[in-house]
Amino acid sequence: MGSSQLEKVLELAHWLIRLRLVNECLVLNNTDLALIMAAKGPNDYGQLKAGLPPWTLFFNIAAYDYLPETRIRGQIKDMEELAQRLVVEPVKVMGDITADAFFEKDSTFCPGTILENTV
């Protein structure tokens, strides 16, 4: 979910956590998200950042051993109702970045080298 208003992003994160609908939440600004996802270094950074909202909330929903399908269906339904109530729209693709690509990103990548080259 992306927004130009940090308050909207934080409100959704607050309720997702409070209602225990998600396992993980991460809020990033467009600079940090572009730095993390820039596959080609500085060549990708500017284009990625331009296509992103100022603030992005990533979250995931998971279930465990006991009735996982039922739990996931319920969590998704509750999350969708919450998003509708808060007038926000969770999406799986934002700009050129997909949620799947973000969660699969190589954790050994160090975005600081891009930042040093763009300053």
Image: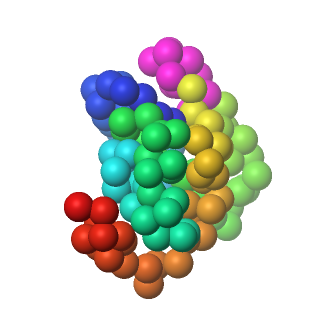
Furthest-bottom residue in this view: 108
Q: Can residue 9 be seen in this view?
A: yes
Q: Quick check: 1 above or below 25?
A: above
Residue 115 picture location, percent across and down: 29, 66
Q: Quick check: 45 above or below 92?
A: below
Decide which of 43, 105 is in the foreground and name it: 43
Corner quadrant of residue 119? bottom left
Residue found at x 32% / y 25%: 5
Q: Is residue 67 left or right of residue 7?
A: right
Corner quadrant of residue 102? bottom right
Q: Quick check: 117 above or below 2?
A: below
Which region is colored magenta?
A: 79-88
Residue 30 picture location, percent across and down: 38, 45
Q: Is residue 13 visible?
A: no
Magenta-colored stretch includes residue 87: yes
Residue 92 picture location, percent across and down: 65, 43
Q: Is residue 92 left or right of residue 14?
A: right
Decide which of 51, 23 is in the foreground and name it: 51
Q: How is the image coloured?
A: rainbow
Magenta-colored stretch includes residue 75: no
Q: Quick check: 78 above or below 94?
A: above
Q: In this view, does 71 lie to the left or right of 49?
A: right
Decide which of 62, 95 is in the foreground and name it: 95
Residue found at x 45% / y 18%: 86
Residue 17 picture location, percent across and down: 38, 43
